[in-house]
Amino acid sequence: MTVAMIGEAQNLPASLLLVGGGKMGGAMLEGWLKVGLPGSAATVIDPHPGPDLQQLCAARGVALNPASDTIAPPEALVLAIKPQVLAEVGPQIAPLVDSRTTLISVLAGKTIANLDAAIPGCGGIVRSIPNLPAAIAQGATGACTSPGLAEERRAMADALLGAIGVVAWVEDEGLIDACTAVSGSGPAYVFLLAEELARAGIDAGLPEELAQKLARATVAGAGAMLAQSPLPSGTLRENVTSKGGTTAAALEVLMAENGFRPLLRDAVAAAKNRAGALSG
Ligand SMILES: NC(=O)C1=CN([C@@H]2O[C@H](COP(=O)(O)OP(=O)(O)OC[C@H]3O[C@@H](n4cnc5c(N)ncnc54)[C@H](OP(=O)(O)O)[C@@H]3O)[C@@H](O)[C@H]2O)C=CC1
Ligand SMILES: O=C(O)[C@@H]1CCC=N1
């Protein structure tokens, strides 16, 4: 497994077609334009582009929904539609690619075999699972390639995915559903933690606005420490926990037999199972 850092922009593709400019596709496009992908190199297809996407494309000279007979086969096809519409959308996209194209998918659950069946004719496939902090170039992406993908195609995908955060390449495609459950869906678990911490603060007597402000800043501050500190997360946790103090009292509840650990394990297992069910 290799981890690429942000800024490896020299291998960005000469042409990129993004299909699906929703939350994930839009976040990635924003990141790529920030690190130097020229707007003129990008084309977006999305039948109902939201105002943010329209504004971004107009501001950066990105072609949005041009006539399909004007789209040349791109070096990179980035697929960011819902997994449930792949079978329907695939035949519309297949005529737009050829063997020069590398398909980069972010679809939860859809396997390399599913992608190849839906959009045949690409010269290689990267199956990846980014996450929403890609919008601020702090994403975490798990990725794998179709067998024997040419090194320059992988480097191009690495530049794209590395431009929006950390990339972890795995050899075994079977690990991607677990990546989906941990880092793809993971930001939602953290946002829930912020919501519930605020709610618990209200129950403990804080005014709502203050509880929300403190909970949000606490999750953000702890996240920033995780990003910046070389210490393992367990050590950071211990550094908060004074012997016989308040944190120890709280952690005793959270780490009880039926507490946070089995709950999170079950949640991640449910997400992984759902990713598996989206295959096909
Ligand atoms: N959101 C996340 O945090 C993550 C999402 N993903 C993956 O990213 C993909 C997109 O998810 P997300 O961005 O959240 O979903 P969104 O619904 O926000 O985005 C999907 C976009 O695709 C558009 N679309 C629908 N049909 C077509 C079509 N025929 N051609 C082009 N575009 C089309 C949708 O338009 P309309 O709304 O009009 O249908 C929508 O704008 C999913 O496969 C998901 O698994 C992966 C990791 C994280
Ligand atoms: O919820 C989902 O299915 C997508 C994939 C990972 C995050 N969002």
Image (cartoon, grey):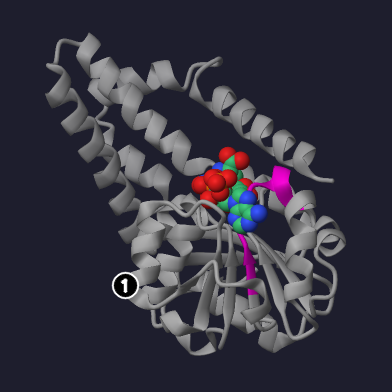
Query: On the picture, is 113 further left or further right than 213?
Result: right
Q: Is residue 82 visible?
A: yes
In this picture, is 162 found above or below 200?
below
Quick one: 125 or 217, which is closer to the camera?
A: 125
Quick one: 251 or 265, which is closer to the camera?
A: 265
Residue plotted at (56% across, 88% down): 14
In this picture, is 202 found above or below 41?
above
Quick one: 222 or 235, which is closer to the camera?
A: 222
Residue plotted at (31% across, 17% down): 249
In this picture, is 274 found above or below 37?
above
Residue on which disc 1 sits = 59
Residue 138, percent from left and from top: 39, 60
Disc 1 residue type (three-letter):
Ala
Residue 187's quadrant in the figure? Answer: top left
- Quarter of the image with the N terminus is bottom right
Residue 23, percent from left and from top: 47, 50
Query: On the picture, is 26 further left or further right than 89?
Result: left
Specify the segment rendered in magenta: 77-86
Q: Magenta segment: does it hold 164?
A: no
Residue 203's quadrant in the figure? Answer: top left
Residue 200's quadrant in the figure? Answer: top left
